[in-house]
Amino acid sequence: MRPTVHDIAAAAGVSLATVDRVLNQRPGVRHVTREKVEAAIRDLGYVRDVAAANLAKSRVYPLTFILPASDNSFMHGLNAEIRAAMARSAAERTDIRIVEVPAFDPQALVRELETVATEKPSGVALVATDAPDVRAAVDRLVKDGIPVVTLVSDLTGSLRHHYAGVDNIAAGRTAARLLGRFLGGAQGEIAILAGSMLVRDHRERLEGFTAVMAQEFPALHLLSVLEGRDDPEVAHMLIADALGKNDGIIGIYSLGAGNRGLVRALKEKAVDRTLTVIAHELTVHTRAALLDGTIDAILNQDAGHEVRSAIRVLKAKADGLAVIDAQERIRLDIFLKDNLP
Amino acid sequence: MRPTVHDIAAAAGVSLATVDRVLNQRPGVRHVTREKVEAAIRDLGYVRDVAAANLAKSRVYPLTFILPASDNSFMHGLNAEIRAAMARSAAERTDIRIVEVPAFDPQALVRELETVATEKPSGVALVATDAPDVRAAVDRLVKDGIPVVTLVSDLTGSLRHHYAGVDNIAAGRTAARLLGRFLGGAQGEIAILAGSMLVRDHRERLEGFTAVMAQEFPALHLLSVLEGRDDPEVAHMLIADALGKNDGIIGIYSLGAGNRGLVRALKEKAVDRTLTVIAHELTVHTRAALLDGTIDAILNQDAGHEVRSAIRVLKAKADGLAVIDAQERIRLDIFLKDNLP
DNA sequence: CCAAATCTGATGTACGTAAATCAAAAAATA
DNA sequence: TATTTTTTGATTTACGTACATCAGATTTGG
């Protein structure tokens, strides 16, 4: 049997109340006594029974998720996964709130972070917009003792406790190698469709992609980046235009959202030519395109895993517990038509 | 606030004791009364607080893991992950026991399953050897009310509650497509190195691989399967021999273990030729080979995920709770040198 | 050395459920 | 109707921890 507070009290030769004061960092314990208790805790290998503690505290974890109000499949999926987690709130003792802020608007995000700070939740998860003010606001939250996890897009250089998302540089590099290898030794042009260079994850994907391309596949020439603003219509226009003007294009890397437009353009303009296409995020549209051969590979991040991981980490941090790192690593999924879930 | 047993009792107009009898399926409740209580449970949306219940029961989940006594990196890794889970036993209320049985020996496995049945654990996880007797033994366990999860290798057609492992047919198909695409339109021979055709997961990988190869890459000719018994020495010998005799080989698919031998053979015999190589399972050896370019892609199943998933599922089944399917799907990881963890 | 301040112990209640006991009520049987 | 059997209620203890209160002990400062 694992030791309880009673065992600690007996071993340290103090009362239960004193053990409790030490464990919960309440005042009124002399230094020497505190050390006696801590020694007993170490010796017996006591670990607080979190379930019992939470029961006694009737603890719930109020968690706030701050998301950009973007109207694309990925954000909708993320939203749905958070709602699914809300449905499990009772069992998980969470009380989850979703807040939407205008996308790509650092100031709005900062204001929201400040509002959230006054509510003192057990934890905050946010899709970070990369700006110094946001960093500062996050750091303030952390210094107030509130666990913070970045979701999907990281905020490097800030004090956030954890990042629940994929390594986007690695994603870009992987896309480059897949595209390069799939194209064999062929020579030609590569079109790149991004959402916006203002978002960190897209910038990082591009960075990784161009690095590997330059180093390992010099026969492939990268065209300048098309910014589709994650909008299917814009994406369609840009790709249709590019394919019409340039028949040297033999490959496409779509690193953002709005792939419905990309797929439509491909079906209209590229039936007669062989294009190799790599895209991000598995949606109904990209899935269908992968199956019918329009897209050759999809790189994906599992929003469900990201949300569940963020919640686990926030709860653990709120309790000062360790997390299983391997479990919380969000993996880059590579889907070919053969290994779709 | 979520409803408690007290609320149910009040709503159903019965006493706490009766609610308890209904909840824990104890005898001594008239049919009509039982239905009144169940109605109240539904109406109020009561869900038992598992943490409190476990606390009251001082419940632990005795779990038994049955593994083949195989001496390869993957099984060692699996073993290590189970031990890591044992280290978390206190917090997770588990009491995990590992039993090793001779590999590829259905009778030994059946005997062990029968022994385990007498111990009435809360759950059993096993790496299944595919045989009718084993299926029957598993079915008996299930009928005794003991949750059973197959690990790594499934036992289709049995009553096991869940399979914690990858889809090996999909894995084989994916390997085929990667190899085919990486080879461009080239023509040549493909060597296949397996552990043994007696193991279901290897058979399934081969099945998926040959299917896609035949259908989509007719220019590639598959050589007959080499069985390396998951042994590095045997694998080395077989591959070195094949490469020496046949210089039409342009690709290799290694779908089992013992890749240390494969890598050594490649470094000795294939420095001057360009081979495309796909292997399974990320280990120190395959990892190094991927980084230095000897191997082009690694397909992997995350043993840690499999073990944690098996434990979660067994606990949930023991409590009659639902599992999050998406969370328990074990994914096929595809590693290129760019997205290694 | 006494008063004040600080520390410690003893005790009780609570969290939500499990499980047991005994008494009382209701139903079934004779 | 009397008796037995079955069903239900009331109550208590327990799980391991949190938290509050009050009394008693010990340590400080003057």
Image: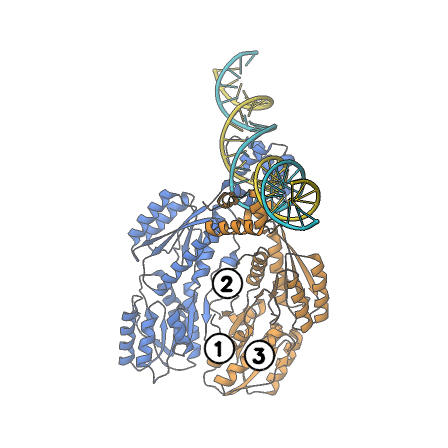
Chain colours: A orange, B blue, C yellow, D cyan
Tell us which disc is closer to us: 1 or 2. Answer: 2
Q: Where does the image place residue B297, in percent across and percent down from the top left? A: 42, 74
**Residue A2 appears in the picture as rendered:** yes
- Chain holding disc 3: A
The local crowd at label 1, few if under 14, some if 14 to 19, many if 20 or more residues have their Cα within 10 Å, is: many
Disc 3 to disc 1, C-alpha distance: 14 Å
Share a chain, discs 1 and 2?
A: yes
Of badges 3 and 1, the one in the foreground is 3
Indicate which disc residue B91 carries.
none
Between circles 3 and 2, the one closer to the viewer is 2
Q: Is residue B277 left or right of residue A287?
A: left
Q: Chain of mark 1?
A: A
B52 or B139: nearer the viewer: B52
Measuring from the top left, give residue A171's x and y in whole percent.
53, 74
Indicate the position of residue C19 as horizontal and vertical percent values.
Answer: 50, 35
Q: Residue beneath label 1, please? A: A178
Contact? badges 3 and 2 (CB < 8 Å): no
Which one is earlier in the sequence, the residue at label 3 or at label 1?
A: 1
Q: Residue at x 63, y 83 (%)?
A: A241
Count of numbered marks? 3
**Residue that label 3 marks:** A206
Other residues around mark 2 within 10 Å, as few (<14) / some (14–19) / many (≥20): few
Which residue does the numbered mark 2 point to in the structure image?
A: A325
Residue A254 visible in image: no
Q: Amino acid at mark 2?
A: Asp
Q: Nearer the viewer, residue B44 or C27?
A: B44
Where is B320 relative to A97, above or below?
A: above
Disc 3 crowd rating (10 Å Cα; few below 14, some 14-19, many 20+) is many
Q: Assign a secondary structure to mark 3.
A: helix
Report the residue at 44% width, 70% height from top: B174
Q: Callout 1, which amino acid?
A: Leu
